Image (cartoon, rainbow, N blue to C red):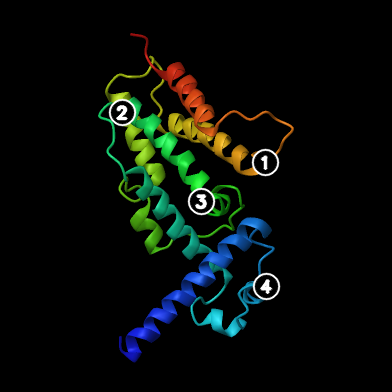
Amino acid sequence: MGVKERREREKLETRDLILEAARELFASEGYEGVSMRKLAEKIEYSPTAIYVHFADKEELFRELCHHDFAHLAQSFQSVPLPEDPVERLKHIGKRYVEFGRLYPNHYKLMFMTPHPPHELDQRDNQVRGNPEVDAYAFLKHTVQQAIDAGAFRAGIDDAELISQTLWAGVHGVISLHIAKHCDSWVDWRPLEARVELMLTAVLSGLRKEA
């Protein structure tokens, strides 16, 4: 490996180190509680070294969000999908919970940490609404397929409302698990059993009777 290639690899490794440390800090301290100086102290770098990679805290935060939301969208399609759209919704819900279980800091940053307001940039507009790279668009697209197939009861035909309700259900399961799974006050049942029952209950309530 030449000098140029080695330097490029070291630069990428430093960038990854910054992102991983920032994700942990944002998840634990919240957006307002993190400064570039605090991040520099955590990884034992100078603030100047971080500014080589990111112009400011907002750019760093947005880069993390883009990366983690893309990772979530990819996880939905990483295994073969059921043909039946309702069964596919159950698959999406289980993959969502599994993502949160495997990557709790990612999940806390994405869905349990208040995000600062920002205007959509060019990269946001390229992702938003594309089911291949936008996790919410993928969910809504599958819900619309279930509606078009006549799978749901009469009057249940708002894809946005159904998507947001399903999202709220799985978010409740995994966020409670992340925040409270070590709490011995509750005799917790297995995570897989909780998400299975929640999805079965919600989807059964939506589904048209045979």
From the image, state whether disc 3 or disc 4 is nearer to you: 3
Q: Are marks 3 and 1 in contact (CB under 8 Å)?
A: no
Marks 2 and 1, how far apart at CA: 35 Å
Mark nearer the N terminus (3 vs 1): 3
Towards the viewer: 178 or 201: 178
The amino acid type of the residue labelled 4 equals Lys
Q: Residues within 10 Å of mark 3 (few under 14, many from 20)?
A: some
Position of residue 65 measured from the top left corner of the image (x, y, whole percent):
48, 58
Mark nearer the N terminus (3 vs 2): 2
From the image, state whether disc 2 or disc 1 is nearer to you: 1
Marks 3 and 4, how far apart at CA: 23 Å
For the N terminus, the quadrant is bottom left
The amino acid type of the residue labelled 1 equals Cys
Up the image or down, 65 lies above or below 102; here it is below
Q: Mark 2 = which residue?
A: 85
The amino acid type of the residue labelled 3 equals Tyr
Mark nearer the N terminus (1 vs 4): 4
From the image, state whether disc 1 or disc 4 is nearer to you: 1
For the C terminus, the quadrant is top left
The amino acid type of the residue labelled 2 equals Pro
Marks 4 and 2, how far apart at CA: 46 Å
Towards the viewer: 198 or 110: 198
Q: Mark 1 = which residue?
A: 182
Marks 1 and 4, how far apart at CA: 28 Å
Q: Secondary structure at mark 2?
A: helix
